[in-house]
Amino acid sequence: MAEYRAPLEDFRFLLSRVFQIEHFWQSLDKPGDVDMDMANAILGEAAKIAQEVLAPLNQSADAQGCRWDEGEVLVPDGFKEAYQTFCEGGWNGLAGSPEFGGMGLPKTLIAPVEEMVQGACMAFGLAPMLTAGAAFAINAHANDELKARYLPKMYSGEWSGAMDLTEPHAGTDLGLIRTKAEPQNDGSYLLSGTKIFITWGEHQCSDNIIHLVLAKLPDAPAGSRGISLFLVPKFLVDAEGRVGERNQVSCGSIEHKMGIHASPTCVMNFDAAKGWLVGEVNKGLAAMFTMMNYERLLVGIEGIGVAEASYQSALRYARERLQGRSASGAVAKDSAADPLIVHADIRRMLLSMKALNEAGRAFYLYVAQFLDIAKFSGDAKRREQAEALVALLTPIAKAFITDMSLDATIHGQQIFGGHGYISEWGQEQHVRDVRITQIYEGTNGVQALDLIGRKTVACEGKLFSVFYQEVQTWIEAQKGEQHDKYIKPLSEALQVLKSSTEKVVANAKENPHNAGAVAVDYLHLFGYVAYAFMWARMAVEAQSQEVKGEFSPAFVEGKQASADFYFGWLLPQVSCLQQRVETSAECMMNLSEAGF
């Protein structure tokens, strides 16, 4: 059975040293009285929940899966008890507004907690993830009455949340949705329609489920301009917050999926179900997208969590499994063979996993900083710059992190050889589970189109200029030859990205297909450079005497060796990506449909 250990030392290194998080939190206006002592205490307790409560359920829950029974969804054994333990610990309300019982903590502290939960049992972690997202949208857009009625029990976990967007005929193009909302004299609406792919849309773990549903009023404009957002509870709630009769919302079936078997993915039917408007009429898509930056970042965090679990398992196996002899001669001379870890190709895969996972972890914290500034800073100019960087970097945080997480997880499976294909060891589950992160919350291809279209071409690279200046300022602040082996390749890669960005903007004017043709490669080019920025920062910090005195020698050695591997082995991908990004779409678009 696979084990999971929370990467607490890496969290502490990133928060306290790389991002100087105490100073950062002090620069904000409203994140509460947070310091590293409090952060370490929270992370330590979250690690216990992840390791002792959630991780032991991961494989058994996947094997058992969920079951649909005449509209009711039964989750795997142990999940309801784990959910109660999780909620009793207050973990559901970390990000919630203190006005309604939440803790109001910054994303830079919540994100590591989220990674531990997802790494321990991703299928379980989706439940609090969806509740937090729904609560975020309600707090941002609902009226005071709805906030007071629903948020306290969502933060406590007594009630959970779900997002109902997709319909059988309408996925990414939400303007095609057919779910209707009929206004009533009492200010409520009756919603009718069917939604699919609704994660944790029905279950028995909480006393109520609060659905956020996209629908259209009878006189709504066509397309996405006519979408409104509605709050639709599973059970109706009275003015005092008491649960009453069942609403006309039901689960028609659950999906049979490649992975995350323990997370119910539901078909939800709304048959004149009573709901309430959240935000303004016909502004539902904007209201829903308020939470999407948080959700999409969290999908990236999911990827890191699963890839970290895969790495830990693969590393243990590589240390224990005896196979062959080292190319330089026997290492374990008293054994019949050497452990796998002596072989260069095994080390290539392990170092690839380590380098990608740790850069991804640093990157999601980097993006989380800008979310915190946008939410908590009283400086309007600082908030504006942070919002620009969040808009630019969110597609990369979702898509590049999850693409690299799948690559890392496949490496982990490969290290096991034939055993990686067998359920007993857990690696095949990691591959199945992490694969969904590339698909939901906007497929990674859609994320790439968003990055290259709206975030780059449409503004002629102005958002990129904000990121470029951010990295360039850091580079110029580094002095001393001891850092050159990291600063020089980072600087060169940054200039490649700048040149390619300019070329992408120019090429888009020549052929409308050019941007779409190179979108994924451009996102990957951007991602590799962003990871190089993270590794340069980590490597420079790891060279300091303070870090060497505070962290274990093995940890510091691992950081420096991983940085060297990233710059020498992985960053050279930018050369190939640059060639593809700067080409045209002709080789893709000239082939007739019949030619396929």
Image (cartoon, rainbow, N blue to C red):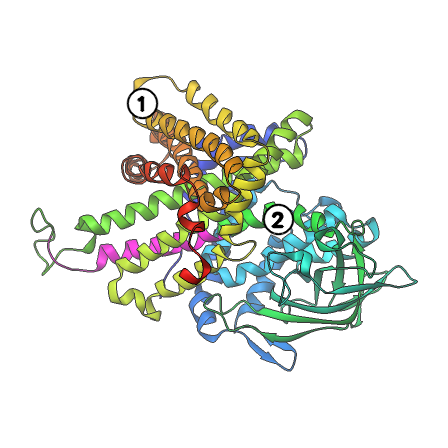
Secondary structure of the residue carrying tag 1 is helix
Badge 2 crowding class, 10 Å Cα cut-off, few under 14, some 14 to 19, many 20 or more, is some
Where is residue 389, by image quadrant? top right
Mark sitting on residue 292: 2
Q: Nearer the viewer, residue 211 or 282?
A: 282
Q: Split into 4 quadrants, where in the image is the C terminus?
A: bottom left
Q: CA distance from mark 2 to mark 1?
A: 38 Å
Mark sitting on residue 484: 1
Q: Residue at x 55, y 65 (%)?
A: 82
Which kind of residue does numbered mark 2 sit on? Met
Q: Nearer the viewer, residue 241 or 373?
A: 373
* Magenta stretch, residue numbers: 302-325
Helix, strand or loop for the magenta stretch, by majority: helix
Earlier-in-chain disc, 2 versus 1? 2
Q: Nearer the viewer, residue 450 or 538?
A: 450
The answer to whether the residue labelled 2 contacts the one labelled 1, judged by CB atoms less than 8 Å apart, is no
Q: Residue at x 36, y 37 (%)?
A: 579
Where is residue 392, by image quadrant? top right
Q: Residue at x 59, y 78 (%)?
A: 68
Report x, y in % for residue 173: 63, 56
